[in-house]
Amino acid sequence: MSFLTPQQAADLAVEHHRAGRFAEAEGIYLQLLASEPENPDLLHLLGLVSHHTGRHAEALELIHRAIAINPNMAPYHNNLGTLLIELRDYERAMAAYHVALRLEPNSAGPWYNIGIIHTRRREWPLAVEAYRTALQFDPDYPSCVLNLATALAASGRLDEGIALYEAALERRPNDVAIATNLGNLLKERGDTDGAIARYHHALGFDPNNPSTLNNLAVAFQDQGRHAESAAAYRRSLEIKPGNAEVHSNLILAMLYDPRGEPAPIVEEQRRWNRQHLDPLKTAWRPHSNSRDPKRRLKIGYVSADLRDHVVGRAVLPVIERHDRDQFEIVCYSNGERDAVTKRFAAHVDQWSDTSNLRDEVVAEKIRADEVDILVDLALHTSDNRLLTFARKPAPVQVSWLGYPGTSGLEAIDYRLTDPFLEPPGMELAASGEQPFRLPDIWSCYEAPSGFPPVAESPALRAGYVTFGSLNSFFKINARTLDTWIEILRAVDQSRLRLLTKTGSHRKWVTEFMCERGIDASRIIFFDYESAAQVRPQAEYLRRYDLIDVALDTFPYNGMTTTCDALWMGVPVVSLVGKLSLGRAGLSLLSNVGLPEFAVDSPAEYVRTAVELARDLPRLTALRRTLRSRMQASPILDASRLARNVEAAYRTMWETWCQQAGEVR
């Protein structure tokens, strides 16, 4: 640097800084600062380097020093706000941005960052307003366009978000982020063909983009294209093998594989452990929780779905009925909030929004909160926190409700199950995760508010029997359709109703069945509704007024859909599989007193459905009595389930108290 003028040295340092060579930039800044210790620009730049290298306290001190020397520089305040956002100090960040705007009123950056704060808080209308203001000052601000479209969609203005992306893609056709995000919104609207086309468009410019490949895999999964979905996930992991989220997506996708074989799933779970959990084991530490087997226990529930969601609706009745004298309840939520979330918050001792916290930060928070038993409600479903559990922040860790089955995580000690989902001898865990069988059922059902009365069998009005499945389409495969075709062949004039998103997969189903002798007029589709379009649950249930017999999917059975059907008086025929998720129908039907409708072979499945369809008096009687059967069963007895779950927690805790102090 001795051959450079101070200005040349400063220019070189900025060049290093912009290129991400932070150590080189910092070295030059420090040498320059030795000659000018009160130079606010140098202090500000050093603060940015500290920020970029994770030294946040040092960054705050340096930027505050720069502001103290020259408080009239808008970039100083703007960058201070960005640092404060990372520290989740949103109030002070907002104040810093407003100072920046007072100094430079026509600046887009602070308005964009204010939008980020509102996005973090899920204040979607305010986020939309902030992003729109930023674009007034800088119409060509790509990341602002992306965030605005996302905020529009999240605030229920999905079509506006899509239109914004489409216009942006016309201007910037080679922008991978715009094309990918447009695909995401089209998928959310139910246009999976359009989504897949946009993902392929993006991959045309960046064929090795792991995020786009992951999103393409999700869209393939929605269309029931299981092999293509798994291949796209695997390609994404080849490019970025450390992505635990994509690896979880692959494991989840494998659960829908038509073959329904346990071995490949178990092996992939072991691979997940090797790739993502094993490197964290060195950080496992003994827990200092008091080993008193009878004391009040602190139970922590971790989920992104503590809201109007199948998991949220399943766990809420238990949380509302927990014995608070014996159990202190803490929720760690990393998902959206709604009216159901308020019910959760009203029945817990502590509510923590962890949506913007890294897994390691959440783990340390849980440890500091001295949680005794930590319950994962996601397994490998989206937005899971398995990397938090992989750090073993609680003495006892349990998986439950994401789906019937095992996470395979070595850091999780137990999974809640029942005697039907997982009878003794059927343990399939990839690790030491032990099945803990509740006495009768794994989950309960709470009928939606304002539910409609049970209608008479539609066959009595129509003159023919209607079969139906309202399960997610990705649970449907060629083997399932072949079985349903046999049923339609055996029952003259019968119809089949399916719930699907729009797209080419509808054409595939129709052509598949037509090629096997089923006229297209006998296949009727219910439209899938996006989150922005969703109708009240009670209105959704009225679709069962048009179905006589519900056909369960396999090898992945329905759970909530089966409960919905039974509640609406519609009997369900289910095929028992090799995995727990293929035995959900058996569990529910056994608990409602109809185990004969859960059968062991496709031939029995066809025979049972056909016999039901040909016995209208029995269908009519079932229609009139199924709801009362449900009401009298353990399925609707949330208090009973709560006591059973609490007994399980107490037994798990007593076992831990008897063990030595090392971390398993």
Image (tube, rainbow, N blue to C red):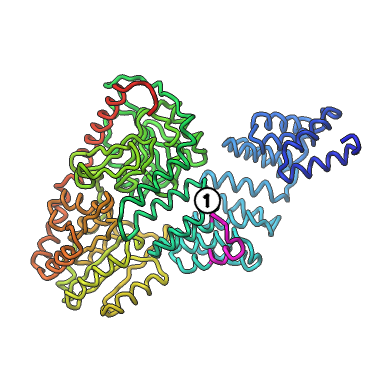
- Secondary structure predominantly adopted by residues drawn in magenta: helix
Task: Give the residue displayed 62% in from the left and 53% down from the top.
Answer: 131
Q: Tell me where residue 20 appears, x and y as whole percent.
A: 71, 43
Q: Is residue 18 above or below residue 538?
A: above
Determine whether the residue tagged by mark 1 lies in a helix, strand or loop: helix
**Residue 596 lies in quadrant:** bottom left
Q: Tell me where residue 153 appears, x and y as whole percent.
A: 50, 57
Q: Is residue 306 above or below residue 458?
A: above
Task: Give the residue displayed 32% in from the left and 63% down from the top.
Answer: 476
Residue 449 seen: no
Q: Between 107 and 171, which is closer to the camera in this rendering?
A: 171
Q: How many marks?
A: 1
The residue carrying mark 1 is: 124
Give, as a three-letter code, the residue at label 1. Trp
| Residue 197 placement, left or right of 567 | right
Q: Quadrant of the C terminus?
A: top left
Q: Which residues are magenta?
A: 198-211
Task: Give the residue displayed 52% in from the left and 41% down from the top.
Answer: 356
Residue 617 seen: yes
